[in-house]
Amino acid sequence: QVQLVESGGDLVQAGGSLRLSCAASGSILRIYSMAWYGQAPGKQRELVARIQSSGSTNYADSVRGRFTISRDNAKNTVYLQMSSLKAEDTAVYYCNAIIATIDYSTTNYWGQGTQVTVSS
């Protein structure tokens, strides 16, 4: 069993910064990619940023240059540093990870979500 636990969501003014964290725990053998998705009210969940086990990253066009994804493999944790926040960044942010567990199965896991609200 694997759990992803997010933290760091908050209410922040436009132009401000936040750092989201997501820690994976459980019967983990290996973590492949880790990612953050955002779901704004009334919209579909969309990829914000992804980081591979190699460290390579990709970003949604809307956040490139403002957000930075990173990971600490020793802690099984992924971070999202959010800067120059805009009202349109308001969303529930979900952590996602592709994880191989000790039974050698590989599964796509999701966290419970953390709310980020940007006031204009």
Image: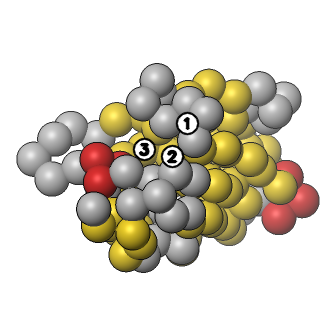
Spatial CA span between label 1 and label 2 = 5 Å
Q: Determine contact: label 3, label 2, CB under 8 Å.
A: yes
Residue 7 percent across, percent down from the top left? 54, 74
Task: Kindly state the secondary structure of the residue where label 1 is placed.
Answer: strand
The residue singled out by tag 1 in the image is 49
Q: Determine contact: label 1, label 2, CB under 8 Å.
A: yes
The residue singled out by tag 2 in the image is 36
The answer to whether 107 is drawn above or below residue 111 in the figure is above
Which amino acid type corresponds to the residue marked 2 in the rendered image?
A: Trp
Q: Is residue 8 left or right of residue 27?
A: left
Residue 105 percent across, percent down from the top left? 63, 40
Q: Residue furthest left?
A: 42
Instruction: Tell me what residue is drawn at x 62 percent, y 25 percent.
Output: 58
Q: Is residue 52 left or right of residue 36?
A: right
Residue 17 percent across, percent down from the top left? 56, 63
Toward the viewer: 30 or 14?
A: 14
The quadrant in which residue 13 appears is bottom left
Q: Quadrant of the N terminus?
A: bottom right
Of pointers 1 and 2, the one earlier in the residue sequence: 2
Instruction: Tell me what residue is drawn at x 54 percent, y 73 percent.
Output: 8
Query: How many numbered circles are shown?
Result: 3
Label 3 Cα neighbours within 10 Å, binned few <14 / some 14-19 / many ≥20: many
Of pointers 3 and 1, the one earlier in the residue sequence: 3
Instruction: Tell me what residue is drawn at x 74 percent, y 47 percent.
Output: 70
The answer to whether 8 is drawn above or below residue 24 in the figure is below
Q: Determine contact: label 3, label 1, CB under 8 Å.
A: no
Q: Quadrant of the C terminus?
A: bottom left
Instruction: Tell me what residue is drawn at x 51 percent, y 64 percent.
Output: 16
| Disc marking residue 37 | 3
Task: Kindly state the secondary structure of the residue where label 2 is placed.
Answer: strand
